[in-house]
Image: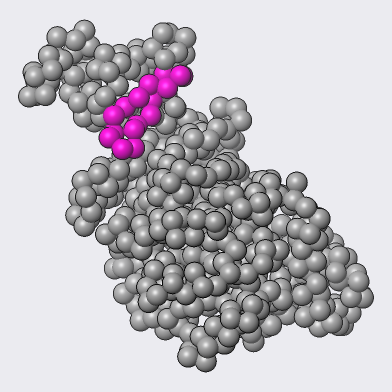
Amino acid sequence: MADGSAQALLQNVFGFDDFRGMQAEIIDHVLEGQNILAVMPTGAGKSLCFQIPALLLPGITVVVSPLISLMQNQVDALKILGVEAGSLNSTNTPEQTDEIWEKIHSGVLKLLYLSPERLMAGGMMDTLERLKVSCFAIDEAHCISQWGAAFRPEYEDLSRLHTRFPNVPIIALTATADQGTREQIREKIFSGDVHTYLAGFDRPNISLRIEIKNGWKQQLVRFLNSRQTADGSKENGIVYCLSRKKTEEATKLLQDKGYNALAYHAGMPGHVREENLNRFMAEDDLIMVATIAFGMGIDKPDIRFVFHTDLPSSPEAYYQEIGRAGRDGAPAVAHMLYGMDDIRMRRMFIDNENSDDQHKMRGHHRLNSLLSICEAPECRRFSLLHYFGDKLEGERCGNCDLCDNPRETIDATQLGQKMLSAIYRTGQSFGMGHIIDILVGKITERIQVRGDDSLPTFGVGKDRTVAEWKSIARQLMARAFITADMEYGSLKITESGALLLKGQESFRYRPDVILAKASGGGSSRRKKAQNVLLDMSEETQVLYQALKAFRKDIAVERGVPAYVIFSDKSLVDMATKMPATLDQFGDIYGVGAGKQKEFGPMFISFIQENI
């Protein structure tokens, strides 16, 4: 358990009564000088795991972060709390940079945010060696594995931190890292000297829905129409598109249908992207239509849906992108469309990457894993969590399209056993292609050289097409009977798979993966998502809405997102308790000493004027 000093900071600076999950234990280990890899779901409070040690340790904590917007949001939020933090990046004026360096040299600054490129360039490492660095925090650490050395080689260079600063603890944090990615991070950043915390990947408040693409425009409009309440109010959401052209096309479609929608992609002028982002952070009903250039570092808590018009690149990308919804814990929906053209395009993107064959192979394996989730015969959350090495309590989540509307499946235990037998008899050393060649009885050079045409399983599946066997393999993977080695792609039999092979487990297969038209998220959950204030009196709801408008005005004036001022949960607490003194205001959720002093008088005055 974290010591009293950490507990006091949690309450007095950040305004929270108790640590959550693994936070306290991680903070203790960082304070003891241990290296940490923390894999925690979005909303679990990863930032506190390095921000509190930064305030307790002497010297400065250096935070490595991939995006300027992500750095600036955290710096703005810390400053409002009264914490000295700064970011050295390309948007700084010379005066801002000079001020930050002055605070660093005087020992005032506690957290310094840098991009990997800034950290590794211009003698920054030499400068840091002359300072008292208490800790390095690497945010969004999964980028080390997934972006590849050719894209941002400075992520690879972060391996130098461990040798240049052997006595300085490093904490790497991410919400998205499968087993292979975790192993890469452990080896590259820590040389294996690290304590790993795996807090689980489940986001149970997000309803998962996937359907075959069949006229994406109509499907998108139908989904959005289903999200509207009886009074016509709309929600914040993100619509992801694969290309810039499609992003513009979808934006115009939604605008023509009367939706408050804006586009965001890398081909737009920077000032337009920034203006659209600012509007998205400030407005309650805006839909951002974007490529994946939009998202990382967007910490808006009340995004109610994420809609993919195209297949993402991997389970990690899918998990990251849907994780932008429902950060406030209220119900949200992740709805994805996918089709054969998506798969073809994703394969082409991987093959055309400027990377080595090993990186491309991992890209194809990840795509196959995502397809297994798309083709899951039962519960999607079960399949998604299995990919990340996590488990669902029970066999069904009750909050995905396959749980809400089960698809027709057939008993395919014998089909599964045939594939598992072929995997077993070839030493669990080959990928899907070779195994299927054996099952359908295809004579290839490899099969002839190895003599696999003499195996008992050779040709036992020739009554099925190659496409069917691929789908069966993906559904076996989705149900955790087999797994794919991320480095080489060879299929491995799990403990459950061994039981299936022995006839002690059964396997059901969904032969038709074309899904019925989805409803958009489940009516009961949608009603909850659209009105989280049902338990409030009408007068309290009126005050809450007035507080939201007041918060928005303050945020616009200060040039920060509204949630940086106060979260919706804090406003609900204010509307319910109606504090009349500073002491009472200090008891509001999320109010620490800094916010109590900075905002207490103005919010107390506003509340008294509106009750």
User: Is residue 224 toward the left or the right of residue 473 in the image?
Assistant: right
User: Is residue 152 toward the left or the right of residue 527 in the image?
Assistant: left
The vertical placement of 155 against 71, above or below, is: above
| Count of residue discs | 0
User: Is residue 45 toward the left or the right of residue 434 in the image?
Assistant: right
Find residue 537 and report its horizontal and vertical position in percent: 85, 62
Task: Please report the bounds of the magenta region as a residue range.
Answer: 482-497
The vertical placement of 30 against 552, above or below, is: above
Asked whether 394 falls inside the magenta stretch, the response is no
Q: Residue at x 44, y 69 (%)?
A: 125
The answer to whether residue 285 is seen in the rendering is no
| Image quarter of the C terminus | bottom right
Residue 263, by quadrant, is bottom left
Q: Residue at x 46, y 19 (%)?
A: 496
Asked whether 495 falls inside the magenta stretch, the response is yes
Q: Nearer the viewer, residue 94 or 542?
A: 94
Find residue 291 and report its horizontal and vertical position in percent: 37, 64
Find residue 553 and report its horizontal and vertical position in percent: 67, 83
Find residue 139 and report its horizontal and vertical position in percent: 51, 59
